Amino acid sequence: MGEMILEIFGAVTGLLYVWLEIKHRRSMWIVGIVMSVCYIVVFGVEALYASMGLYVYYLGMSLYGWFKWGAKTQQQQPKPVHMNVSTAWITAGLLVVVFGGVWAVLRFLTDHPAPVMDAAITTLNMVATWLLTKSILEQWLLLVVANILAIILYAHTGLWFTTGLYAVYLIASVIGYINWRRKI
């Protein structure tokens, strides 16, 4: 019962996080910290180790994002930008290397039920979050793919509130992309 309450609370804070992300607000990073702690526990209990690790990463990136975006006013916060060629190459390299590493750990060192799917979700989200700290528009495209995969995985494991959250995230990713694109 406690796990379900924590999952519901994590889903609610996740909805708030994505709304603040779409609005490009610094406060999303604080909400991200709270959401991360909730999902570290939820995914740990479900033995979804890469998803749990992803939320450990989110916790760190939320702290980093909070400080990187600093105490600037909304008008001074970073504006969304398109990915440049060098960042695209770094992004592609990160996707390949991180996926390979996460998959290998899950496949050979755990009893994970879906190592490829969880590694893909984790990798896409990690790289997208790194792009978010740089306010790069294309992070939303990585999130669209990650959210589709997450819906499939979390529905399969019976995490219904989390599946619902990722369905909302999928819609929000499209809205976020459109909203940020208008600001460029």
Image: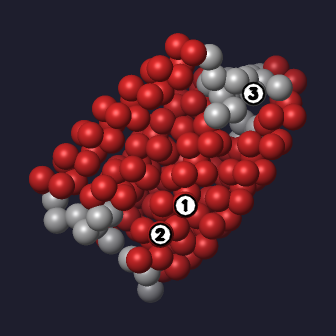
Point 30% across, 55% down: residue: 116
**Is residue 69 visible in this depiction of the protein?**
no
Point 40% across, 35% down: residue: 95
Locate residue 138, reporting x and y percent.
64, 34
Q: What is the secondary structure assignment of the residue under circle 3?
A: loop
* Left-right relation of 184 to 55: right
Give amino acid for label 1: Ile
Q: Quadrant of residue 136?
A: top right
Residue hosting label 3: 80
Q: Quadrant of residue 70?
A: top right
Q: What is the CA distance from the residue labelled 3 to the residue labelled 1? A: 24 Å
Point 23% across, 64% down: residue: 112
Quarter of the image containing the N terminus? Answer: bottom left
Q: What is the CA distance from the residue labelled 3 to the residue labelled 2? A: 30 Å
Q: Is disc 2 surrounded by few (<14), some (14 to 19) or many (20+) residues within 10 Å?
A: some
66 relative to 109, above or below:
above
Locate residue 14, reporting x and y percent.
62, 59
Specify which label sits upstream in the sequence, 3 or 1. Answer: 3
Specify which label sits upstream in the sequence, 3 or 2. Answer: 3
Locate residue 159, reporting x and y percent.
46, 76
Q: Is disc 3 surrounded by few (<14), some (14 to 19) or many (20+) residues within 10 Å?
A: some
Residue 148 got which mark? 1
Which of label 3 and label 2 is nearer to you?
Answer: 2
Count of marks placed on residues: 3
Residue lying furthest left: 108
